């Protein structure tokens, strides 16, 4: 049987064990500190990205901070948050390609340093035209 590649929309909606809060393992404490690590659900990241109003911007770190507060964790995994924001952006691009109008305004979510994310659909050129 042939393998069917998942769409980004399927990846976004895939039900797993997330969100998950775990104690930070000692071998990672030098990098992350002591406490608990949140691995968010992709739909949580998508949901916060969708709430950014027209004319406003948010960074992935602000999204991570909001998720930490919601789940009472010490830190949100920066790698997972970045991957899930990318999945949300590509799922929105798929939705737009299918004619949907009310899509996630992913172009309003910036990298942690405040720059546009070149990994989002269409790259920097597409993002600057949407702002």
Image (tube, rainbow, N blue to C red):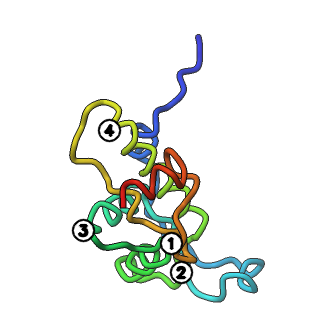
Residue in front for this viewpoint, 55 or 89: 55
Q: Earlier in the sequence, mark 2 or mark 4?
A: 2
Residue in front for this viewpoint, 62 or 119: 119
Distance, label 1 to label 4, CA atoms, is: 30 Å
Work out which quarter of the rendered image holds the N terminus and state it. Answer: top right
Question: Do the numbered discs 1 and 4 sit on residues whose CB atoms are within 8 Å?
Answer: no
Q: Is residue 9 left or right of residue 60?
A: left
- The x, y position of residue 122, in whole percent, is 50, 45
Q: Residue at x 63, y 89 (%)?
A: 34
Crowding near pointer 3: few (<14 within 10 Å), some, many (20+)? few
Which mark is on residue 73?
A: none
Question: Do the numbered discs 2 and 4 sit on residues whose CB atoms are within 8 Å?
Answer: no
Q: Secondary structure at mark 3?
A: loop
Crowding near pointer 2: few (<14 within 10 Å), some, many (20+)? many
Q: Which residue is mark 2?
A: 75
Which mark is on residue 96?
A: 4
Q: Earlier in the sequence, mark 1 or mark 2?
A: 1
Q: Earlier in the sequence, mark 1 or mark 4?
A: 1
Q: Which residue is mark 1?
A: 38
Quadrant in the picture for residue 43: bottom left
Q: Secondary structure at mark 1?
A: strand
Quadrant in the picture for residue 115: bottom right
Q: Which residue is mark 3?
A: 53
Q: Please, is residue 59 above or below residue 85 in the view?
A: below
């Amino acid at each position: 049987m042939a393998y069917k590649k998942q769409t980004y929309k399927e990846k976004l909606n895939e039900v797993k064990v997330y969100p998950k809060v775990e104690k930070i393992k000692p071998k990672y404490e030098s990098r992350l500190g002591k406490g608990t690590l949140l691995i968010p659900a992709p739909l949580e990241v998508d949901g916060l990205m969708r709430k950014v109003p027209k004319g406003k911007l948010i960074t992935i770190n602000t999204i991570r901070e909001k998720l930490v507060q919601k789940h009472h964790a010490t830190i949100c995994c920066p790698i997972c948050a970045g991957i899930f924001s990318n999945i949300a952006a590509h799922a929105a691009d798929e939705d737009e390609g299918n004619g949907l109008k009310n899509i996630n305004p992913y172009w309003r979510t910036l990298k942690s340093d405040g720059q546009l994310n070149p990994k989002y659909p269409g790259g920097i050129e597409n993002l600057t035209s949407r702002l």
